[in-house]
Amino acid sequence: MVCQMEVTSHLLSAAAFDSVSAVREADLAAQLIPQTPDHSLTLFDKGFYAVGLLHAWQSTGTEIRWMLRLRKGTQYRVFRSLRAGQDLVELQLSPQAKKKWQDAADTLTARLISKESNRKKVQILTYMCDPLRYPKAVVVDLYSHRWEIEHEFLEMKQHLLNNELTLRSKKPELVRQELWGVVLVYNLLRFMMAQMAYSLKGVEPYQMSFKQSALYLKSHLSLLPGISPGKISRIMEELMAIAPGLVLPERRVRHYPRAVGHNVIRCGLH
């Protein structure tokens, strides 16, 4: 299953899924290209690195950009050094990939940005090649939003699927139906959360608590089928009124570095 999420509202703008034995994730991602809006930036997981996919992504529409973390072992050629920690690189399309992505060029130009994070070197690959238009600090900050969708997948599993390891359905067509149901319910909740956030001053949808909002919204929305149409507006007003209590508190500033815990070996008594 591959989803595309708008990072400020956390609404899913597109989704595609199939059997893992039938297609690769990159093939599912290619199905989302038509739904990708112009003048947008897509933050990929490094597992989606495929020169053919990236070429197809940037070649469709107007100013569609992409960004991902460079996967270890990726082959590239530096043909121009920019400022410190920035290079323009050339990515080569393999002969096997050329057969699959027939419209792709033989090479792809990208910008490679290196930064230090927790004493580790992190390299970000992006189609935003102009360092004046897209400063390094801005690109690095944008990449930090990459984890937003992982957080939402976790919330789906915890609060919509109750941490179940498998779906209820056993047949392929019913599994697809159930997945679409999960996506639709998630988007309905997120849409309502966005409306609640926009009713408040200075609050963005991602600042709303998904767990608390989902519990409150599901309990109220489930009553709508039994309510007369004339009372629906009152229910919606009640939903908006509770919005201030669903805003997450600001994250505390960390005053100490993260520490790695050591495993303690416990020996039993004989």
Image: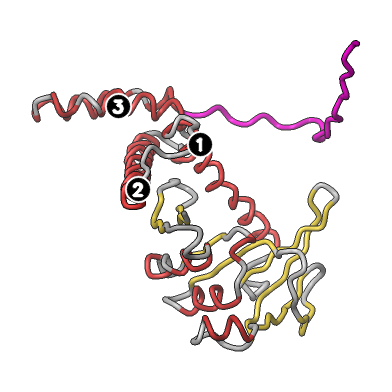
Where 200 sits versus 79, above or below? above
Q: Of residues 254 and 4, which is closer to you in this image? A: 4
The amino acid on which the numbered mark 3 sits, given as a three-letter code, is: Leu
The amino acid on which the numbered mark 1 sits, given as a three-letter code, is: Leu
Magenta span covers which residues?
Answer: 247-270
Q: Give the main secondary structure, helix, strand or loop, of the magenta stretch.
A: loop
Q: Spot the residue most to the front.
A: 270
Residue ID for mark 2: 171
Where 260 sits versus 124, above or below? above
- Residue 59 vs residue 143: left or right? left
Please say whether residue 255 is one of the residues in the magenta stretch: yes
- Residues at discs 1 and 3 in contact (Cβ within 8 Å): no
At mark 2, the secondary structure is loop
Which of pointers 2 and 3 indicates the residue nearer the eye? 2
Q: Where is residue 49 in the image (x, y as percent from the top left)?
A: 62, 68
Query: Which residue is located at x 63 percent, y 63 percent?
Result: 68
Question: Mark 2 or mark 3, which has the lower sequence index?
Answer: 2
Residue ID for mark 1: 165
At mark 1, the secondary structure is loop
The amino acid on which the numbered mark 2 sits, given as a three-letter code, is: Lys
- Residue 58 vs residue 146: left or right? left
Where 37 sits versus 230, above or below? below
Question: Mark 1 or mark 2, which has the lower sequence index?
Answer: 1
Query: Which residue is located at x 18 percent, y 28 percent?
Result: 224
Report how far apart the C-alphas of labels 1 and 3 lie in the structure. Answer: 32 Å
Which of pointers 1 and 3 indicates the residue nearer the eye? 1
Residue ID for mark 3: 239
At mark 3, the secondary structure is helix
Q: Position of residue 56 (x, y in %)?
A: 50, 77
Which of pointers 1 and 2 indicates the residue nearer the eye? 2
